[in-house]
Image (cartoon, rainbow, N blue to C red):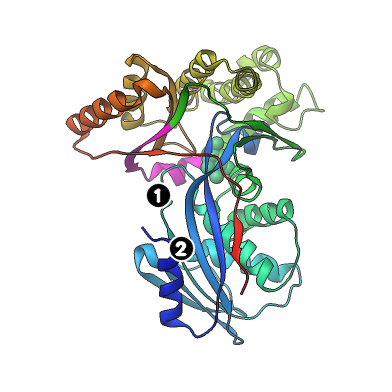
Amino acid sequence: MHSLSDIVKLYEERFDTHPLLIRACGRINIIGEHTDYNNGFVLPAAVDKYLYFAIGENGTADSLLYAADIKDSHRFNINEIVPCEKLWANYLMGIMKQLQERGVPLEGVDCVFGGNLPIGSGMSSSAALECGFALGLDTLFRLEIGRVELARLAQRSSHQFVGIPCGIMDQFTSLLGRAGQAIKLDCRSLEYEYIPLELGDCELVLINTKVHHELASSEYPVRVEECRKGVEAVQKHHPEVESLRDITLEMLDAHRDELPAVIYRRCAYVIKENARLEEAAACLAEGEMERLGELLLLTHEGLRDEYEVSSPELDFLVAMARETEGVLGARLMGGGFGGCTINLVRKEAKEKFLKEVTKAYFKQFGIHSEYYFVHPVDGTTVVREE
Ligand code: GLA
């Protein structure tokens, strides 16, 4: 855990220059999970859990990165950027490589980063890494690429350099989040609108299972591929279809016999999740918190039974939330197989729920969970120019 001033201090202990400072955000997602890479909709918000970056150019062809939270460093030559065994370093190097591929002339940088954004918890610390560094380089070298384009570039880096076929939700949210608002994003057109995240007498609380199963990274590409297979089967009858976004449940049902059961389940989940998102956005606009809570619970069921990306720890937390008076809904958030649940809780019920759930979770799994209150904030920003 590091504050902005810790990061500045660590930078100044190592380097002589006056660094540029960037604050990169994590994100929550209210609803719309595993819909982004299917060209569907998502409803995320940038939140006040941060990674801080201190960055300065050093006039050489070498770059030195220091990850303060894990006390690890990585040096590389900017003319020979190749993936290494450190995942965190790949997220950063991939951004430089993408910029070089646009023909942008760069020089080496020194960079220290760290913060209070939990790593591997479904709050997208990886997008914060990518977007913080991308905005840093954009500012340092006066590239003026623009935020939507930077989000695309960061997603491309995840695909091509890190090897994760992710959607665009995380990078888009980290860069385009706005204080007090959720973003309703159409992941096909990248059209978006802000919806005030006003929850009346309720609050959003994240509960971190503190478990991150290996499956999270290995199963993700499998799900992407399963969805692709579903689309391919329906395309035989409807050549105009490009993604699950274009397929209704009726269309899918009409060809159910031709699909392996598992592919049917995956596709049915995504189609229903897009419909739930539309309803949830309306609930948010109209302050219908109880229905919003029900929708979160339905999403969790879908992620557990149809999309099969849950885990015993996540299911336990959601089951307890479901049984607790004053908790309107809960679901796993992000890619799945661990990380956080997102809970919609009445303010008056919050304290008792968190106390009980923490205790019961420890009794069941022997793990100390953590919880976070999060608030929607402006996306990744320059805190101070060099
Ligand atoms: C990860 C990916 C996102 C999205 C979610 C699931 O966070 O990076 O693109 O697919 O999983 O909704």
Where residue 353 sits, quadrant-wise, is top left
Where residue 61 sits, quadrant-wise, is bottom right
Mark 2 surroundings within 10 Å by alpha-carbon count, few (fewer than 14), some (14 through 19), many (20 or more): many
Q: Residue at x 59, y 23 (%)?
A: 273
Which contiguous range is marked in magenta?
205-221
The image position of residue 385, as x and y in percent, is 63, 70
Q: Earlier in the sequence, mark 2 or mark 1?
A: 2
Q: Quadrant of ligand 1?
A: top right
Which structural element holds mark 2? Answer: helix
Q: CA distance from mark 2 to mark 1?
A: 16 Å
Q: Which mark is residue 92?
A: none
The image position of residue 112, as x and y in percent, is 47, 70
2 and 1 marks in contact (CB < 8 Å)? no
Q: Which mark is residue 4?
A: 2
Residue 308 in view? no
Q: Residue at x 61, y 87 (%)?
A: 59
Question: Which residue type carries mark 2?
Answer: Leu
The image position of residue 40, as x and y in percent, is 67, 31
Mark 1 surroundings within 10 Å by alpha-carbon count, few (fewer than 14), some (14 through 19), many (20 or more): many
Which structural element holds mark 1? Answer: loop
Q: Which one is in front in this view, the residue at disc 2 or the one at disc 1?
A: 2
> Image height check: is 46 above or below 284?
below
Left/right placement of residue 143 relative to residue 224 reads: right
Q: Residue at x 79, y 23 (%)?
A: 238
The image position of residue 359, as x and y in percent, is 21, 30
Where residue 365 sits, quadrant-wise, is top left
Left/right placement of residue 147 relative to residue 159 reads: right
The residue lying toward the viewer, choosing from 258 and 60, is 60
**22 falls in the magenta region:** no
